[in-house]
Amino acid sequence: MRRRDFCKLIVAGASASLAGAVSLGEDAQQTSPLTALSTATAGRANYPNHRAPLLPLKYTRLPLGSIRPAGWLSDQLTVQVHGLTSHIGELWDILTLSAWKGDAGKNVLPECCTPRFAPRWLEGLTVLSGVLGNDHLKALTDPYMQYILDVHELAAVTPSVIAWSHLGRFLPDYYELTGDRRAITLLRKILDYSDASRDSQEKIVLEDPGRLGMLLSFGYWYYDQTGDADIPAMLERCSRPSVDDWKDYFAHFPQDPKYFVHFPDVTAEKPGLPPPDWTRQGVDVTQAIQYPVQHYVMSGDKSDVDSVIQGIANLDQGYGQVGGRWSGDEWLTNTDPAQGTELCDVEELLFSLEKSFEIVGELSFADRIEQLIYNAFPGTCTPDMWAHQYDQQSNQVLVSVAERHWHWNTDTSNIYGFTPNFPCCLANMHSPWPRFVQTMWMATEDRGLVAATYGPCRVHAKVAAGLPIEIVEETNYPFSDRVRITIHTGKPTSFPIYFRIPSWAVGAEVAIAGESLRQRPQQPASSGTFFKVDRLWKSGDSVTLNFNFKVRCEKRRNNAVAVAWGPLYFVLHIAESFKNLPSIPLGPKATETPAPPGCANWQITPATSWNYALVIDRQNPQCAMTSRRVSSMPFAQRGEMVKQPGATQYAPWNGDVPLALHVKARKVPGWGMNGASAAQVPLSPVRSDSPEETVELIPYGCSRLRIAEFPTT
């Protein structure tokens, strides 16, 4: 598209934005989730936005390190630092001998997926170092980065375009962390190499051309830094086939029954078609969610964004699972809560939504980010971050080496271990928490800030005419529905703050320095909107958000229910019995392989019953809630085997989960196992003559065994 056409689109966006503005008073106003992009120039904002002819971002990320975790979130990242993130460089042979640090030819073949592992770990390590200001973590990257940044011929390290694209994804972060301009030079090499290789038929060079949309996530940043005039056209020719394919998939979702195949029994025969012919790989889908939205920055075509919003709705309908994820074990499957979801699917969906949110400001993207990071991601890792699953299940009543009705994956896929099934998740598990912290707050083009997602943190940012301020966000969110935000500034200054009011808020209340804005009928804080407060701020001014969460029931497959409160989903608390397996069968020959020293492969069996139907009013669920102190290992439950920071041995955790619900239930004796998984949830309503009991529900992220989808009586 010509520069003149981009300019016309920008002007049109400005007109739409002005026409749609609604004034709600001097202090506050409410804005729709998806509004036209601002036309403010990069010179007016405090943080650079895209160069023309690219459309500007709705929100701009703050420099890496501007947001520091606090409270329980700081504890969670501390747990990660002491877990696998800082240790696998010495435990994993793929990293100890690697072409990425000069060991020529080591661990960079085959293209799928060995050469990608080191860059994926380095991404998490780099961003974690930045959000914590941790020099030790930065030093762990040095043997790799100092070699990579001086490489002249990329193919001498690995010919894999996708592996180099994964490296490119975090080079902007590395540049912010170090100021090393070699990162910018290397990005140009990666873009040129990708352009030259985009039509390659060699599998060792380009296994999957559909992933070339990845180039957009860092190609724009490179263009913003350098202004190299050929970059927009290069990005268009490299990414357009991928974007068009995924845009068509999302907008015209396949309805052929083979896309919704269900295995009624673990022994059922799988479709006799090659996997790509009967569905798509989960990680490809979650990675591609961002591609059309990213392309919108070049095209200005709103149908790019619309296709993704429609695609998410289609994926929810066909493959939706509790907590905002989709089933994908390895390929997309269906809505049965016994189907698996790969850890990489969760990680890539988080990244895609974070990138997409900053481009268009779609509030539902931020809602889903919270659901994923507070449920699915901690639920598929051990709370000490020393082990992970390949596939998690919503109804996960046994963790073992056994055949399950996965579409593709092996018998070790739901073990919590070092490398269950395949090593990709071991490489990818390090970025979700630091990426989440990095994007909690962003800058707006009117020189203010937006609170995108919630959790305890401290923010240093520039507002108004470049004035530095500090924001202290005090909360136990998501284990609490209240957030207190305090502004510290050197002098009184006027600027706007946009507070996201989640879709699950009920009659949210916003108070500034004790003055309730909800008392003014023209200024309600409606759920699913951004609440704008534009005022003169003095140091010490505070804003209190009370989201007034209510327990809610969501209808699931077979008329089952999932129980939620705020972004959290609550699951049956099943007592867990842990056994560290000496080895598990891995690789194409299922070779018995032990975990490295200090690591474990956990088999977990239930020590209490799990086959309950809830006795609950779906429209008005009544549950007793118990709130407790958030422990230093926030997602651990009492009795779970963990390795505490600094410890050398695993021991039972002696803390409690931060929040619990208590609800009436009855056992359903006929609901049993299907192989190594829970059988399908009985169609509700169910009849049970079992006595009524009170059962405890705990946050999904605090469970390794669980029932998340319940029948009801």
Image: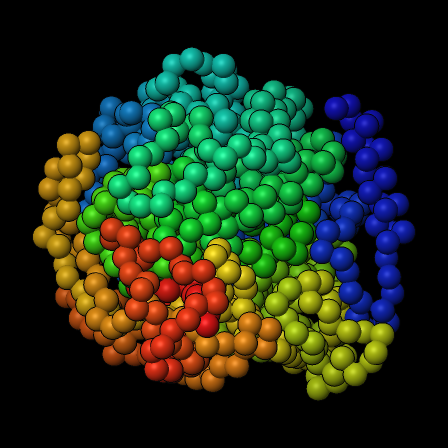
| Picture layout, residue 595 above or below residue 224 | below
If the image is split into quadrants, where does the N terminus sit? top right
Residue ID at (47%, 20%): 193
Residue ID at (56%, 66%): 454
Residue 186's spot in the image, x, y percent?
46, 29
Residue 265's spot in the image, x, y percent?
31, 45
| Picture layout, residue 497 above or below residue 423 | below
| Picture layout, residue 373 above or below residue 631 | above
Q: Is residue 240 visible?
A: yes
Residue 149's spot in the image, x, y percent?
40, 32
Q: Quadrant of residue 669?
A: bottom left
Residue 637's spot in the image, x, y percent?
31, 73
Q: Residue furthest bottom?
A: 514
Position of residue 135 in the picture relative to residue 351 (left or right): left
Between 134 and 565, the one lying in front of the other is 565
Between 653 and 413, the one lying in front of the other is 413
Please state the total of marks drawn on the protein image. 0
Between 670 and 545, the one lying in front of the other is 670
Residue ID at (41%, 42%): 262
Q: Is residue 497 visible?
A: no
Between 81 and 322, the one lying in front of the other is 322
Position of residue 83 in the picture relative to residue 554 (left or right): left
Position of residue 631 in the picture relative to residue 480 (left or right): left
Residue ID at (86%, 61%): 22
Q: How has the structure been colored for display?
A: rainbow
